[in-house]
Amino acid sequence: MLEFKKKRLSLLSACFLLALAVALDDIIDDPSLKVAAATPNTRKSFFLYAVNRGEGFNLNRDVYMRAALTVRRLAQLDSHRTNWFLVLPPWRRLYHWKSNNVEQKNLPWRKFFDLDALSRFVPVIEFEEYVREKEGNFIDEIIYLQHCPIVDGRWDIKMEVKECKERMRYTQDSEGIWRGQYGVSIEFATRNFHCVSLQGHPSTIADYVARTQPRSILFDRFETVVHENHYDKEWWDARRSMVYSAVLISEAQRFIFENLPPKKLHSDLGYPYMAVHLRRGDYTLHKRKNLPSLESAAKQINRALKETGLDVVFIATDALEEEINDVRKRVDHRVVLYRPKEDDLKRFGDGGVAIIDQWISVNAQHFIGTDPSTFTFRINEDRSLKGFPPKSTYNAFCGDGYEDKIGDEEGCHQPHSWPVVSMAK
Ligand code: GFB
């Protein structure tokens, strides 16, 4: 009996490792991501950025893409002279990371993402590496971005040095040195600081940097920069390079393997369970017509299970335990949630657990999210990259009373499906 159990376990772990290898291969091995090789005899320069403090994790990820697209463009303009590196801003403790007994103050990007995969789009380094490389935290120039007032309803490209109009978190000492911070006690400094009013794209910033040639430059409030061509090939290439760290993917795959129904052989359609992202938390503080009550969410889950013929639902959520129990009672089929052990929570942090929830949702046969949560949008995008049909991917819960009005702008808006553009023309 013991021998049989051992054999079964080793067979299961072999299948799990195979599934994991396939999952990683799927996302990393894409030739279109190759970044131009560094030219010898060119100098190294560094592009740094920072984001408004209040933003959540998944908007921060979109701002990363704007920075990566800027550096990609910069490399196109300037690679004969300079090898540009994108410096990753350490993660300060975010508002949504609520677990108290977990150390999550100043986290490096490698905790969440595979840096080799990111570097296939643009070369990236952590801020600590920048400090080692430059033997200090000095930056040639820091630009604090601020919005331009829109004149006559026109949105024109503008980039002008202006008086600083926002309350900033920078201080200047008696020697004229300006100091700012990424996270708790992660400080950077410059002698050259100014505010710039901007209406512009990654290419606007890249053109400026290629012209002025600093050896290192930091743009604060980089969320001010807006995407040029949302969902074009470059955008999808940048998005594709945002592969989660192997540790998190492996934990998500282990969980699927041990707790959810096995994938059918030769099936491209993911694992036979439904996943939902039920966003609660701060969303419940505002009146949103498309945020369902728990009763309505459970009804919509039951209906989708019936329509898809699936009989297990995985729920990714930031809901309170009592809210989860309420939904659990109302759903007709098996409900599964990822709940890390204390040690695992310490290891992954709240940010890592959220990614594990996302990756389990990415792999489901059918998905329903919450509109307009960027947490949901990142799941949508990964599912598109994996080739899931829009019908099983771009779905969102409807608010109470709108359950039969799918597509209603106010109460049942559905996420737009953008086809993945992958092949170079
Ligand atoms: O990622 P995020 O910006 O998405 O912020 P939204 C939501 C955060 O809440 C995630 C946690 O990064 C997680 O830390 N969270 C939300 C979850 N849903 C889940 C879940 O299913 N599982 C786990 N484990 N964690 C923005 C907010 O939220 O929406 C702003 O950042 C604001 O505060 C705005 O409310 C309207 O785009 O959903």
Image (tube, rainbow, N blue to C red):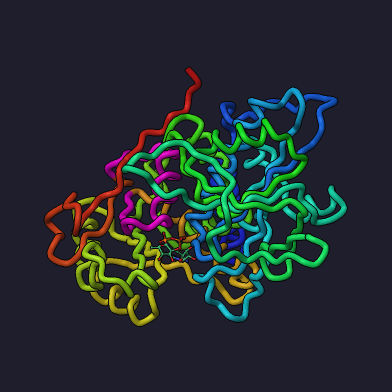
Q: Residue at x 47, y 29 (%)?
A: 233
Q: Nearer the viewer, residue 75 or 97?
A: 75
Q: Nearer the viewer, residue 31 or 328?
A: 31
Indicate whether 21 appears above or below 346: above
Indicate whether 102 appears above or below 416: below
Location of residue 336 (image quadrant): bottom left
Is residue 381 within the magenta segment?
A: yes
Q: Residue at x 27, y 42 (%)?
A: 391
Q: Nearer the viewer, residue 236 or 70?
A: 70
Quadrant location, the N terminus: bottom right
Location of residue 46 (image quadrant): top right
Q: How many numbered circles does the render carry?
A: 0
- x and y, in percent, of residue 247 in the image: 63, 56
Q: Residue at x 47, y 67 (%)?
A: 338
Indicate whether 270 appears above or below 252: above
- Going by the image, does 173 lie left or right of 403? right
- x and y, in percent, of residue 238 in the image: 54, 38
Is residue 424 within the magenta segment?
A: no
Residue extending farthest front: 163
Mark yes or no: residue 194 visible. Answer: yes
Indicate whether 256 appears above or below 345: above
Q: Quarter for ligand 1?
A: bottom left
Range of residues picked out in magenta: 366-391
Residue extending farthest right: 135
Q: Nearer the viewer, residue 123 or 153?
A: 153
- x and y, in percent, of residue 15 in the image: 55, 48
Mark yes or no: residue 13 visible. Answer: no
Q: Residue at x 65, y 52 (%)?
A: 194
